[in-house]
Image (tube, rainbow, N blue to C red):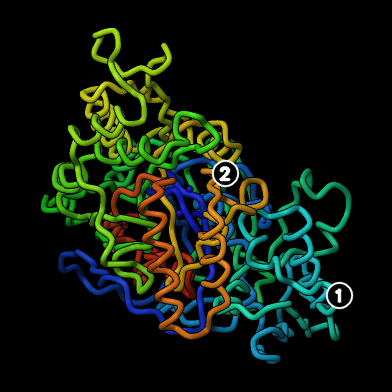
Amino acid sequence: MRAMRKSATLLFAAALVLAACSREKPQPPAQTTTTTTATATPAGPRTGGRLIRRLESDVNTLNYVLQGTDDERQVLQYLYDPLIDFDQNLEPIAGTAARWEIADEGKTYTLHIDPRATFSDGVPVTAADVIFTLETILDQPSMQFASWFDSLDREQTKAVDDKTARIVFREARVTQLFTFNIGVLPKHIYGKGNFQKNRAVIGNGPYILEKRETGRSILVARNPKYWREQPYLDSVLFRVINDDNVAWSALQRGDVHVSRVNNDTWFREKDKPEVAEKIAFHDVYPLGYNAVPWNLKDPLFQDVRVRRALAMAFDRQTVIDKLYHGQARATSGPFTPDSWAYNPRVNPIEFNPEAAKALLASAGWRDTNGDGMLDREGKPFSFTLLIPAGSKTSIDQSQTFQDALRRIGVEVTITTLDGAAFFDRVLQGNYQAAFLSWINDPDPDPYSLFHSTQQPPAGINVVHYQNPEVDLLLERGRTEFDHARRVETYHQLHEILAADQPYLWIIQVGMKWGVSKRVHNVRPAKGVGLFLWHPGPFAWWIDEPGT
């Protein structure tokens, strides 16, 4: 749910966004690589043209504060500039805030708004807009961002003058600076009427919303009032294409210029001369993982023995070898293997169907009537697994899991939903289990995912997990500035969550982006890929049709 970030996200099946980085320099993620063949060097950047991007699911909202999915975040990047941006190395750089100071041992942040910054309607961005945005994040609350600012001292936080915002927190947090990687809402637009029902889309980014066809497409056009360096592209058309195979065909024809490509397609197509002539593949291991969340409000999953038994029925290595052609890594908890927070002493739960059956029997699940299926108190062990439409690997994995569970006496019904409906069901807790993915930041803060206070709508603890010891570790992890002690804290957190299994943690997938060779200056950033850093896609340019 690409966890929500900056955020956690659903990549594998889909994606939410979860974010916050830190002042500490993160260890670099795995190397990114670009696979291309030699082509003629283009004459130089060209202004104009329309880029067509695949959108894997339609968006529910283009309200910055209410966003919840990676697809929404991908579109909103074009419409909003963040207060503090990231460069290609994921270091903080000026955005809407031209500069900032940190005082009071990390509790006070003074942001100086760039005097050139304006919204797309021409109204200048002010400190009052910044304060309004933070208050709105807390008052709504924003599922995506509220936990980042829950220690905000609202009485002390204020606009010092038209272009200076002083933001004060009750406690210092390691990742606080990077929580300002958020857009700014115009108070004169969103401060009127019912915020939830306000359909205005007014940002301060390089593009403006020109047209939206629900379920089909979103068109953004270059903002003539944009105050930073203008991007080369005149417009970007997001086409909603749920199905991976349909998207790949569109990329081959040139009907789409940019699309994520599943590993099966990549492996099958990458060495074909006709593909290499037209398409460049960009590879990155994102700071995210695929997982199955168990809804712990459902009595079926409240016994940790059951959750661990289900994990024993998932054959990670076969999935890595057969479905991802080796382009994935096994994971054991809420951090990726290339993160300093990952505990290398915690191993993924091994595939062991017989041990799974024995553990389920200890929890009272036995085949009492000889039909081959487990039951308890006259009820069969069966549940529904949600997956988003269109993802071949999600379908293949869910069917592999379904077959393995059936062999140990557990019946799984797979239900496929379009992206928007999938996210709604998970966020509302109207599910038993689901295939999804979360994206962490280089300096992760999983508070919103696992703290007991962060169950929706307050946060994105969609599994409704509650553990007082975990709550304490999460609170310590965001306030401990000694890096060694913070590593120890997160390693303890990893160990406990791996034991409790509120999620079945599966793999970290090597992501593949297919980009038309008509598009130039495409570069990935380690850990995040092609987007969500500056200048990123705003430095791209495209050849004229036919060239």
Judge by depth and name the residue closer to the eye, 168 or 250.
Answer: 168
Any mark on residue 361, and which?
none
Residue 539 visible somewhere in the drawing: no
**Residue indicated by mark 2:** 59
Residue, x 23% and y 67% (percent of image)? 34
Secondary structure, mark 2, is loop
Residue, x 26% and y 53% (percent of image)? 348
Q: Amino acid at mark 1?
A: Glu
Residue, x 64% and y 59% (percent of image)? 208
Give residue 507's position: percent from left, percent from top.
28, 52
Give residue 97's position: percent from left, percent from top.
66, 81
Q: Amino acid at mark 2?
A: Val
Please count the marks in the image: 2
Judge by depth and name the residue closer to the eye, 524 or 350.
Answer: 350
Give residue 145's position: percent from left, percent from top.
63, 61
Judge by depth and name the residue closer to the eye, 181 or 94.
Answer: 181
Q: Residues within 10 Å of mark 1 (few under 14, many from 20)?
A: few
Give residue 65's position: percent from left, percent from top.
68, 57
Direction from residue 157 to residue 68 in the image, left or right = left
**Residue indicated by mark 1:** 155
| Quadrant in the rendering for residue 128 | bottom right
